[in-house]
Image: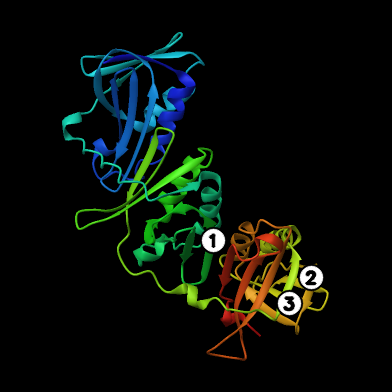
Amino acid sequence: MKFEADKDVLADAVNFVVRLLPQRASLPILSGVLIEAKNNEITLSVFDYEVSAKSTIGANVTTDGTVLVLGKLLSEIVNKLPKDQVLFELVDNKVNVSSASSKFNLLTMPTSEYPELPALPPTSGEVEGQSFAQAVTQVAHAASKEDVTPVLTGVLIEATNDSLNLVATDRYRVAVKSIPWKSSVSDSVLIPARTLQEIARTFSNQGSLAVSIEKTEERQMVAFSANNKSVTSVLLKGNFPAVLSLFPENIDHEAIASVDEIEEATKRVSLVVEGDNPIRYNFGNETVTIKSITSETAQASEEVAVELIGEEIGVSLKPQFVLDGLSGINTEHVSFGFTKNQQNPAKPGPLLFTERGDKAGEFKYLLQPNLLDEN
């Protein structure tokens, strides 16, 4: 195998596939990038039996061939090369990589043992890449980080003819985002949140993104593709909880505040909060008082202007959960909707974060207060 390619184009392709490599590969060869050279094209791919990524670029191919080399090392080398043409050449069991005066050689791994990548299913619909990436960013942080309940580590994507609804929950909060898409397919898929975040990051600037859903006895997978780049992922198994029923139909008790002001005040007060403890938000007629309630070594409080509709109320919330919800708000002001606690009317129910203005209803974030600290 021998080829020459533009350094920047090659680096983009290598970085694309390497981002989808497993954090802990079950086999050494699954840490590799498969490089195939033929017909003046280079195809780079990775696959760990659950997630695959592939990118094809143009190159000057002198000799066809296929090699498998360590992915992260390849990425580090290519990114550090001078901005010039990069020459790859297989000599015996090593790949020589050179650019200007820089020269490296990499040991190859056996390609015969590398798994065959899954074929892409037919396209189910198309969505704008940037809006999809933004939606994933808004909801994915609400997915569980614990593997005890695998189904909660995923993001549920429900597809209708004209919209995609993304839903994530870790039992303490629920995040939902709705975006338009073009399709004649109605289906739902549950994708690991980490994989989906990498996919969103990868395709955020790729324009129109094709989405393919395949559910057969042989395969349960979803694929994303755009501009000679593609990613496939197996689906998580299990029944996602019916969390959409938790959202109230109407809100008549709410507080409206500046996103930036609430966010900055929360960050400052949380400086003195120890561990995962909550902070207190007391919503008054004109201000919300944010204060630490559990720290023994330091105290903090701050006031932020609000417009309150309804009676005064106090809730205790984990600051990071509040910041996660605010990060999904893309309007200047946020609405905090106060709901009823169906099991204990004396205590507050979940707090609903929504955007104000034209985007109202597109993103919703429902956060359960820390009821042990309510007083």
Residue, far left: 112
Q: Are marks 1 and 3 in contact (CB under 8 Å)?
A: no
Mark 1 vs mark 2: in front: 1
Q: Mark 3 points at which residue?
A: 282
| Label 3: how many Cα within 10 Å (few below 14, some 14–19, many 20+) | some
* Residue 95, position as x, y percentages in the image: 29, 18
Q: Which of marks 1 and 2 is nearer the N terminus?
A: 1
Residue 115 location in percent, x, y?
21, 39
Q: Nearest the camera: 135 or 8?
A: 135
The residue labelled by disc 2 is 306
* Residue that sits furthest to the top in the current view: 101
The C terminus, quarter of image: bottom right
Residue drawn at x 83%, y 74% as measured from the top left: 286
Q: Considering only vertical position in the picture, is 60 above or below 260?
A: above
Q: Indicate which label's residue lies in the foreground, 3 or 2.
A: 2
Q: Whole-percent x and y of residue 5? A: 41, 17
**What kind of residue is marked 1?**
Lys
Query: Against 218, is 257 above or below?
Result: below
Residue 120 vs residue 322, the one in the foreground: 120
Q: Residue 177 carries which label?
A: 1
Q: What element carries label 1?
A: strand
| Distance between mark 1 and mark 2 Cα atoms | 25 Å
What number is the disc on residue 209? none
Question: Is 40 placed above or below 189 here?
Answer: above
Q: Which amino acid does label 2 sit on?
A: Val
Residue at disc 3, secondary structure: strand
Disc 1 and disc 2 in contact, CB within 8 angstroms: no
As rendered, which of 241 and 72 lies closer to the eye? 241
Q: Which residue is drawn at 30% across and 52% down?
A: 221
Under mark 3, the amino acid is: Asn
Q: In which quadrant is the N terminus drawn?
A: top left
